[in-house]
Image: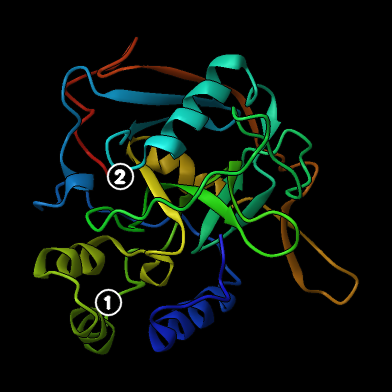
Amino acid sequence: MRKSLCLLPALALALLCACGKADTKTLPTRTADLISTERQFTAPSDGDTIAIFDTSLGEVRAVLYPDAAPMAVYNFVGLARSGYYDNTIIWRSEYGFAVQGGDATGTGTDGSTIWSNNPYPLEADANLKHYAGALCAAFAAGGDVTGGNSQFYFVTALPDSVSTADQQAELTANGYTDAQVAAYAAVGGLPYLDNTDTVFGQVYQGMDVVDAMACVDTVKDEDGNDTFRPTEEAAITINSVTITTYPGPGADTADSGSNVG
């Protein structure tokens, strides 16, 4: 995840400023009945690959997109099946932005891949965006390593984060379709990360759990700045990640069609 590289500078600044003002963390109210032609808001089909995150705060289910981001998905699936993510933590919790995990060291400075730990390249699909609930591969840049590894994040942008006419007009001016602009307006997101990080999945059940992850208490440094690292008492554990096919074990198919709430 890179906040410094912004394809939409004005919009990025507005979103980052909004996140920085979030002193009070409250669970957002998200729409459960969004009507959209966007892929990420279409209910998974029988047989689609899904990931089930069993966490200390509850269960999260996300559909994966191996056709659009094959390397990100294959790496994530391979690591999950090997148990790599078992008993790891969400090491970053930034309200209104994202929650991030996938580093077995728990520090956020390391990661692994199924390719002898070699990074994989960016896979930016024009039809997958950083809407709230997007499951994304964190993309490291700079130093000796550039590319994706085991780290991932869920977008937790607030529903009104792309709500102004100016923000939406900027998206249109940058080539976003009407459906994409409408989806960002309805659910929020981080459009300035589009084309800089890989979206490889979308939460369709348990977004309330993801939002709860973004609301935990976090550690302040000696200057009072937020480190976005959960306090020891608020630690979030990923017990396991199970890879299966939709609808998956124990799923209530009557309630599993919502991607945003």
Left or right, 252 with reference to 95? left
Gap in angstroms between the C-alphas marked 1 and 2: 18 Å
Give the vertical position of 162 relative to 143 (above or below): below
Q: Position of residue 1 (x, y in %)?
A: 56, 59
Q: Position of residue 27 (x, y in %)?
A: 45, 54
Residue identified by numbered label 1: 163
Q: Secondary structure at mark 2?
A: loop
Left or right, 63 with reference to 169? right
Q: Secondary structure at mark 1?
A: loop
Q: Amino acid at mark 2?
A: Gly
Label 2: how many residues lie within 10 Å, few (<14), some (14-19) or many (20+)? Answer: many
Kindly check if marks 1 and 2 are in contact, taking CB atoms under 8 A apart as contact: no
Residue 90 visible to an observer of this rendering: yes
Give the vertical position of 237 relative to 80 (above or below): below
Residue identified by numbered label 2: 261
First-in-chain label (1 vs 2): 1
In front of the other: 121 or 85: 121
In front of the other: 211 or 136: 136
Give the vertical position of 207 relative to 237 (above or below): below
Q: Residue furthest top?
A: 249
Dividing the image into 4 quarters, which one contains the C terminus? top left
Q: Position of residue 120 (x, y in %)?
A: 54, 44
Q: Residue at x 18, y 64 (%)?
A: 180
Give the vertical position of 257 relative to 94 (above or below): above
Q: Amino acid at mark 1?
A: Ser
Colouring method of the image? rainbow
Left or right, 94 with reference to 181? right
Q: Determine which of the numbered discs, if any, sits on residue 127 in the image.
A: none
Residue 59 visible to an observer of this rendering: no
Q: Residue at x 43, y 66 (%)?
A: 193
Q: Position of residue 177 (x, y in %)?
A: 13, 69
